[in-house]
């Protein structure tokens, strides 16, 4: 009898992975994942059979993981949380009787928040700016609604060469609802080698250094910077 673990490995280093994720990888015969992500856990994956594909091979990877899991213990890995722009959804959509267990991980917004201070302390939402599977019109609508609803907003997949202006346009929309001094943080490689943090506000925001290795967090109307730390108050009367 085989099994498929769908694992969120967190940002990448072993100490930021759950014990449950680590143990599932250790007991797996086969590891399936995007080449770069398998590399992040190479010490754990040592000696195991690896099935890795490039970024766009998601469907192929999931089908192969499900097929292999009929007779083997298999882990398919996503960075962060597998249930947030990861592999969990597609696996469950494709699943047909296989034994699947989803194991959570620290998603990029939580990883980045820990580096910044406490920016997502209050109601918040994740929006991906990738239009590969979501029409830009719908992304724009969600930005507008989240801005109007005063949610702290974490932007995943914030900028790629094919859509360089989406991030700027999103921030312009948010500016219609929030003050120019609202904090905006860009965290690149949160909790990974090469981590880099940049703090701006809506007026000073500069997207020139932003790429797909970054997450962008925009505060709500109450967020502020205190001694370099990005805080969204929960409402305690101090
Ligand atoms: N499943 C992942 C998200 C995958 S979508 C998770 O839960 O974190 C890929 C996007 O996530 C990237 O373009 C980037 O915006 C963000 N991301 C993932 N890891 C990151 C990290 N360590 N630092 C900053 N952003 C990250």
Image: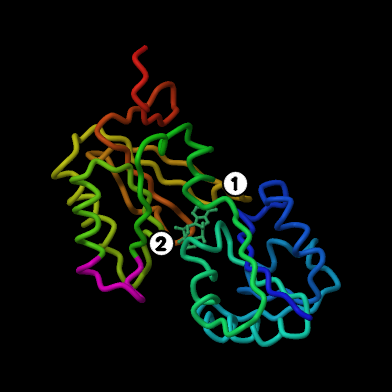
Residue range of the region highlighted in magenta in the rendering = 130-138
* Percent x, y of residue 201: 29, 37
Of 53 and 60, the residue lying toward us: 60
* Magenta stretch secondary structure, dominant: loop
Q: From the viewer's perspective, is 9 left or right of 221?
A: right
* Percent x, y of residue 63: 59, 86
Measured in 3D between alpha carbons, the distance from the residue under mark 1 to the one under mark 2, in whole angstroms, is 17 Å
Queried whether the magenta region covers residue 131, the answer comes back as yes
Q: Residue at x 26, y 62 (%)?
A: 166
Q: Which of the numbered marks, if any, corresponds to residue 130?
A: none
In the picture, which quadrant includes the N terminus? bottom right
Q: Outermost residue, left direction?
A: 176
Of 71 and 84, the residue lying toward us: 71
Quarter occupied by residue 183: top left
236 over 141 or under it: above or below: above
Quarter occupied by residue 2: bottom right
Q: Residue at x 70, y 81 (%)?
A: 51
Task: Using a 10 Å C-alpha cutoff, classify the residue at mark 2 as few (fewer than 14 neighbours), some (14 to 19) or many (20 or more).
Answer: many
* Percent x, y of residue 155: 37, 54
Q: Outermost residue, front direction?
A: 97
Q: From the viewer's perspective, is 146 left or right of 45?
A: left
Residue labelled with disc 1:
191
Label 2 C-beta lies within 8 Å of the nearest ligand 1 atom = yes
Residue labelled with disc 2:
157
Task: Using a 10 Å C-alpha cutoff, classify the residue at mark 1 as few (fewer than 14 neighbours), some (14 to 19) or many (20 or more).
Answer: some
Q: Secondary structure at mark 2?
A: loop
Label 1 C-beta lies within 8 Å of the nearest ligand 1 atom = yes
65 over 75 or under it: above or below: below
Lower position in the chain sequence, tag 1 or tag 2: 2
In the picture, which quadrant includes the C terminus? top left
């Amino acid at each position: 009898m085989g099994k498929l673990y769908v694992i969120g490995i967190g940002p990448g280093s072993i100490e930021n992975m759950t014990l449950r994720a680590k143990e599932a990888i250790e007991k797996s015969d086969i590891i399936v994942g995007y080449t770069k992500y398998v590399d992040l856990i190479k010490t754990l994956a040592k000696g195991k059979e690896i099935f890795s594909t490039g970024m766009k091979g998601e469907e192929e990877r999931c089908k192969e993981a499900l097929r292999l899991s009929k007779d083997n213990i298999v882990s398919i890995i996503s960075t962060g949380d597998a249930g947030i722009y990861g592999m969990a959804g597609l696996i469950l959509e494709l699943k047909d009787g296989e034994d699947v267990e989803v194991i959570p991980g620290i998603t990029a917004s939580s990883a980045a928040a820990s580096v910044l201070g406490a920016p997502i302390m209050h109601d918040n939402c994740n929006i991906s700016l990738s239009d590969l599977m979501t029409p830009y019109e719908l992304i724009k609508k969600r930005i507008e609604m989240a801005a109007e609803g005063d949610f702290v907003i974490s932007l995943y997949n914030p900028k790629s060469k094919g859509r360089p202006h989406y991030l700027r346009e999103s921030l312009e929309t948010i500016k219609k609802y929030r003050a120019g001094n609202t904090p905006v943080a860009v965290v690149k490689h949160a909790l990974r080698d090469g981590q880099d943090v940049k703090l701006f506000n809506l007026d000073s925001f500069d997207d020139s250094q932003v790429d797909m290795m970054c997450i962008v967090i925009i505060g709500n109307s109450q967020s502020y910077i205190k001694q370099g730390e990005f805080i969204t108050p929960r409402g305690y009367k101090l």
